[in-house]
Image (cartoon, coloured by chain):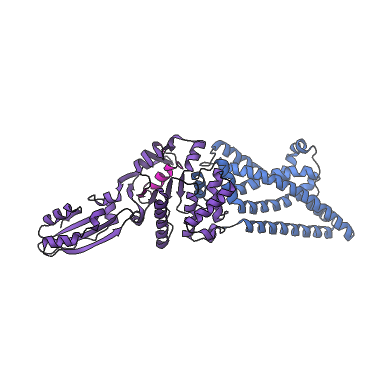
Chain colours: A blue, B purple
Amino acid sequence: MTGTEVAELLWEGLQETAWMVGVATLLTAVGGLLTGVLLVLTDRGGLLAARPVNLLLGLVVNVGRSLPFIILLVAVIPFTRAVVGTTIGTTAAIVPLTIGAVPFYARIVETAIREVPRDVVAAAVAMGASRRQIVGKVLLREARPGLVAGLTITVIALVGYSAMAGVVGGGGLGDLAVRYGYQRFETEVMVATVAVLVVLVQLIQMLGDIVVRRLSHR
Amino acid sequence: MITISGLRKTYHARRRAVVAVDGVDLTVQRGEIFGVLGRSGAGKSTLLRCVNLLERPDAGSVVVDGVELTALSGRRLRDARRRIGMVHQHFALLSSRTVAGNVALPLELAGTPRASRARRVEELLDLVGLGDRAGAYPAQLSGGQKQRVGIARALAAEPTVLLSDEATSALDPETTRSILDLLLDLNRRLGLTVLLITHEMDVLKRICHSAAVMRDGRFTESGAVAELLRTPGSELAGGLFPLPAAPQPREGEALLDVTVSGAAADEPLLADLARRFDAGVRLLDGGVETLAATRAGRLRLAVPGTGAEAAAFLRERGALVTEVTR
């Protein structure tokens, strides 16, 4: 295989990975924030304390987190068909990626929000803040550095998960490394792919760190 | 301005009920600084948190500026809370907001337009002496500066009442004094009513007009500081003016503890006493302090004879006299 051919494969794989991970990240950010906030609010002593809801939500999150991704990928196939109309391809892979990442990010969101000191929340209540204002202006705002740092970890985990997307024809860099490098013994392709992945992960982490530094004033 | 009656609050922890506030009645007059003194665990923090309903009391009522808070909930309670400022022991500032952003928060929550918000924030920061630190983040400030921001924030929505939860407990003595002076200044200039809790006698001494001692969820004594000083056996008076153990009087002498406050403190009491009894009146110990509300002095004297005559003379002049028994 010529260098140009390898470059073309890599470029195509990179685009597929970027699409899968990018869209899944957006959906995960929304889903994870909502779930994480609900986990905090419904907990004992929370602003919307509801023990049964909290326990149920925690259970769902834990189940999502205990499934190995490769199994989740296959298990959600009927759901994927219902949502995107197909079960194979890059876009179809976004569904299991999101379902796998939301519980992961939700726990990180929960932890980050719990780091906000209790007296700061009490101060907001004393100022006459409504629940919505407390969540938006205090909890999420104060937790921002942790939320972004956690999202960085989640995006990198998604890059890892996306390597398994080949199982449902999702393509991407990871799939490239498996098909050419592992199954066809084309070592150069595998090495090149891994190199691109390493650079990609480095870039994501750097970007995340920069944003966290700008947001953090502790 | 603040009327609390029959307040009770019990916590349930692991099937054990802890009575934090056990039937407290309290009235704070408009424009007054009222201090509640107590050790940690006495229930004073719970009492304060019940005033703006951060904790909902089990029984009793809280009326602030004519509004019964204990009867409110939801939106009306939130509106009522805006009329009550609160200062916290550990400042409770938002680390993600600048000084100006923190002070603006109550106004933002109330929906004040941006332009008038900015004007008010500038005004408040000047008031607490932090006009030049508007763009700084709390992490860049000293403890005293943080508490000044906390006070500016508490005043942002023009409250009629300020609640102070151990506002100076995390500060060094010098900073404590400057924060207390600021509170006293605000009280005088804005007519602000202040209810504060503290475990430091010094705080009461410096700025409080009235005070109460809290122990095991109850007030053991309360009243105007000037009154308490005139109350024999008052724990607060003893704390405000501690005297050492009585030295032995000489033969033919009696020991008197004399407390003077208000107008009596300005009279030439000792000179009059010496003139009247001619023979040696000895001053063993004493001090004169300017409290927030009143000037007061406490002296331990050795007088000739039984002391009864001297005591009567001093009482006539408005002093509180206790004969020290040997």
The quarter of the picture where the N terminus of chain A appears is bottom right
Which corner quadrant of the image does residue B200 belong to?
A: bottom left
Residue at the spot x=78%, y=48% of the render?
A: A19
The quarter of the picture where the C terminus of chain A appears is bottom right
Residue A162: x %, y % from top left:
75, 49
Q: Is residue B10 magenta?
A: no
Q: Is residue B38 magenta?
A: yes
Q: Residue furthest right?
A: A2
Left or right of A208: which side holds B113?
left
Instruction: Give the extent of the magenta segment.
Output: B32-58
Residue B73: x %, y % from top left:
48, 36
Residue at the spot x=47%, y=42% of the render?
A: B81
Residue B131: x %, y % from top left:
52, 59
Left or right of B45: which side holds A116?
right
* Residue A31, above or below A6: above
Residue at the spot x=50%, y=40% of the render?
A: B79
Left or right of B25: which side holds A108?
right
Q: How many marks?
A: 0
Query: Closer to the camera, B95 or B310?
Result: B310
The answer, for residue A32, to whether it is visible in the render is: yes
Residue B236: x %, y % from top left:
29, 52
Query: Closer to the camera, A37 or A76?
Result: A37
The answer, for residue A62, to whether it is visible in the render is: no
Query: Closer to the camera, A140 or B192?
Result: B192
Left or right of B13: which side holds A174?
right
